[in-house]
Amino acid sequence: MQEEIKAEFLKSGFTLDEEEEILRKCLTFCRDYSLQPSDLVSSWEVYYLNRQLDEPVVRDAEMDGFLGHLQNEQVGAGVKNDADLHMYSFKDVDMVLDAEDEDTNNVILGTPTGKSEKLHLDIYDSARKANGNIYSSERKSKLVTPFGTRSKKFEVKFNIDNLPTIDTANGFEDHENLEDGIIKRIQPRKNCSLMVHRSGPERGCRFLYDRIEDRFNAIENRIKKHAAAFVASRLYEEPMDPSVASQRSIFSVGMICCESEGHLNDKSIFLQSSVEHSGGQRVRLELNKLSGYSFFPGQVVGIKGHNPSGHCLIASELVDYIPLSIAADTDLPPAKKQALDEEIQATDLSSTPTEITMIIAAGPFTTTDNLSFEPLSELLAYATRHSPQLIILLGPFIDSEHPQVKKGTVDLSFDDIFQSEVLRMVQDYLEYMGPTARLVMIPSVRDANHDFVFPQLMLLGAGGRCWIQVNIGCCTVDILKHLSGEEMSRYPMDGKPNDRLSRLASHILSQRSFYPLYPPAEGVPMDFSLAPEALHISSVPDLLILPSELKYFVKVLSLGGTNEGEEQMKRCVCINPGRLAKGEGGGTFVVLKYQGNPDKMNASIISI
């Protein structure tokens, strides 16, 4: 089995440092945890990404940490498979507290807070009670939970500071007393106007009625759009049929496909061209002449090469991005383009803020031991102290993977939980902060109270319908994790290994799609009758938000190439805020101050 383990590591692009010792330990792992070599290597890839290791080398020094990762996976799998496991709810704890209150008058303390934090929480809670809005469980403030007793709160995990200001490290001005907080809230602030510019499905539309024809058209149109963009750039010739035998070099455009079961590899990689150019034929790709590459199923690329036998296209050059010389909005439908132009013209750009401050957080918004939504409450209390212009909340809100939701031990409907817990907190925050507050909620396919379809429908946008000069794109499906499990890559022989997380995120921009992977990962309810328009990225956004189970990050991505000797380059800030709640503890969120480009921003990843 050691040879099989070694082969799986090599197939995934990893080399072994101390081969004999590593293979011996990996064999022990496989036997102890009943793992196949492919499963072991898949677990190593997740560990490799989460640790953000620089080189694709398996080292003996990482084996102890990898063992701990495997043990955590086994524990998680054991909890899922234990049908008799009882997950206690807050009502179970309420019964215990009621019994204790009958015998004693002891007060159970809640989350320890600092002076400033406690004052702001008090005024926020009093505002909620004044409106008649209180938690559904009056015991919630008295419960002692692992989240409530956490020690490291609002700790900066990562920071990019390109703005030399006197503000604190989290990018906002802090206040030490209640009076300052009231003054700040009442005084006029910079007004952030918001326009939700989307082309996705509307609420109430029919979904998951897509046909085979819709799948075919989605693939065909993606290939044809890329081919047209390559030709329009005048850098490449008209695409040719790659399946026809030819001794001369040709240029072809097609989609990467895997012709065997399992992961993509150098023996199973094929190029499927469009019906227009080749009748939809597939041809195997030979990659030996490419110095470096990164491929995944569904990726549309341009290939220069020759096919001497008619059975294999020998690639000599790879083009995996659309040249930026093409106008950003050429793919917009005429009606939408006209509406967008009118919206921009109607906007008074002189009043547009030169700076925007925002908080970005992704669900789950409650811990696995209860449905109290403590992390969300703490986040909104943090927002009341720092007054961001915009808050972006990405689902899941009512997580279908939550133990109580999966076991059906909740007494309310999912919609009632969402209304009474999540939406009530959000509405209270907006009422408390006043008319200048802006908040956007975007659901996930994991939301138990929302339609199970991808692309998702917008859940809630609170604030005025105006214009803001920051283009923000986001996708709540974990596309980074899905791509990481399907990608095959090779570093240039004379180059340095690049950052894999940056490379995965760059695929989203270079493919101009929020979900370029095909076929979709298991569990993604893709509707191909809605996806082509809703998931298309018409222009490179300023901020790209991709919440993922992989490690949190804020990175600046560069996309572009050369055009007639002139370098074209577009930069985008890509953000993975992490999850606000992880297990029974807290996770992370992002605060951002942005002034128009990555060189003028302050971004911090903070633990809740």
Image (cartoon, rainbow, N blue to C red):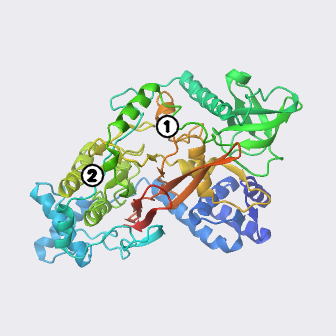
Lateral position of residue 58 relative to residue 147, left or right = right
User: Can residue 527 be seen in this snapshot?
Assistant: no
* Residue 403 in picture, x, y percent from top left: 38, 54
Q: Residue at x 74, y 46 (%)?
A: 265
Q: What is the three-letter code of the residue carrying label 1?
A: Leu
Q: Residue at x 16, y 69 (%)?
A: 99
User: Can residue 543 be seen in this snapshot?
Assistant: yes
* Residue 420 in picture, x, y percent from top left: 21, 50
The numbered disc on residue 535 is: 1
Residue under numbered circle 2? 422
Q: Nearer the viewer, mark 1 or mark 2?
A: 1
Mark 1 neighbour class, 10 Å CA radius: few under 14, some 14 to 19, many 20 or more: many
Q: Residue at x 44, y 31 (%)?
A: 337
**Nearer-the-camera pick, 579 or 189:** 189
* Residue 47 in picture, x, y percent from top left: 60, 63
> Splitting the image into 4 quarters, where does residue 67 fall?
bottom right
Image height check: is 479 above or below 370? above
Mark 2 neighbour class, 10 Å CA radius: few under 14, some 14 to 19, many 20 or more: some
Quarter in which the N terminus is drawn: bottom right
Does the CB distance between marks 1 and 2 fall below 8 Å? no
Q: What is the three-letter code of the residue carrying label 2?
A: Val
